[in-house]
Image: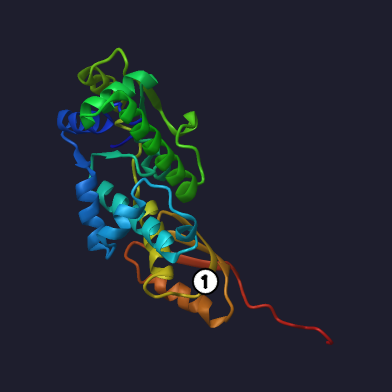
Amino acid sequence: MIVTISRQPGCQGEEIAKKLASKMGYIYLDGILLKEKLLEHQIPDSLFDRYDEKKPGYWANLSKKTELYLNNLKMVILEFASQGDCVLVGRGTQILFAGIPGVVRVRITAPKLVCIRQLAKEQDCSEKEAEKIMRQINNERKGFYRTFFNTNLESNELYDLIINNHYLNIDKVVDVISSLIEVKKDMDCSIDDLILKKKEIKNILYPKKTPLYDLNVEVNKGDVILSGSVLVKENIDLCRTVIMNIPGVTNVHTEKIIPPHVNTFGK
């Protein structure tokens, strides 16, 4: 079972996630562990600090580092989730695992004033300062989701459950989420195809730098369909070879890759 927790600042989302993981016996991916895992994928601390749930600047949007960070972020999350029952917080996880029946996607909310007071308590600051902090965090997260996932993180369709924890303490919120987990625990939660897809994209783009443009990958039980375009026909075979070398791939279809245009002008 995979549980994703989206949260407004000041809603104690991380604390809820930790308590839920403890109660259910699930593993929990926090920011510290995520940073360590990304470092194993050669993503330096500087990139994590720049992009972690933050809106990239204009020049960052044009940088290959942005794409590199996103692909490795997804890969780390998928590898972590493949270990078994887990709780994940933010960072696009509710989108990454969309469409999988055995995933519980939750958003925690509360009235603005409640969030401000909680943030003021956590940050040991005035409510006025806490409101500025909340506004900045909200803007950064919204920018992160628009840039990396082209979506609005507050969209109701992204969640199975939205909880206003104004009148519920943390233990009660955990109980509510646990109840939904019990309802969905027997549903299919396979993410093997998602992992294969990210490995294929990563291997084509980095480090092999296989020249396939407008890349799209579809995976169904190890059966892979590649689409895009190449400048040299031989690169189609190169793409097929790169993907077939990934464990778990059973077949690769390249019929949707557009070969180089043949100029027939004057014939």
Is any atom of residue 7 visible in this view? Answer: no
Q: Nearer the viewer, residue 263 or 119?
A: 119
Residue 105 at x, y percent in the picture? 37, 33
Residue 18 at x, y percent in the picture? 19, 33
Q: Is residue 160 above or below residue 41?
A: above
Q: Nearer the viewer, residue 121 or 144?
A: 121
Numbered disc 1: secondary structure: loop
Q: Quadrant of the C terminus?
A: bottom right
Q: Which residue is label 1 attached to? A: 212
What amino acid type should be assigned to the residue bearing mark 1?
Answer: Leu
Whether residue 185 sits left or right of residue 28 in the image: it is right
Q: Is residue 257 above or below residue 123?
A: below
Q: Quadrant of residue 134?
A: top left
Residue beneath the point at 22% across and 21% down? 170
Whether residue 262 sits left or right of residue 59 in the image: it is right
Residue 233 at x, y percent in the picture? 57, 80
Residue beneath the point at 42% across and 59% down? 66
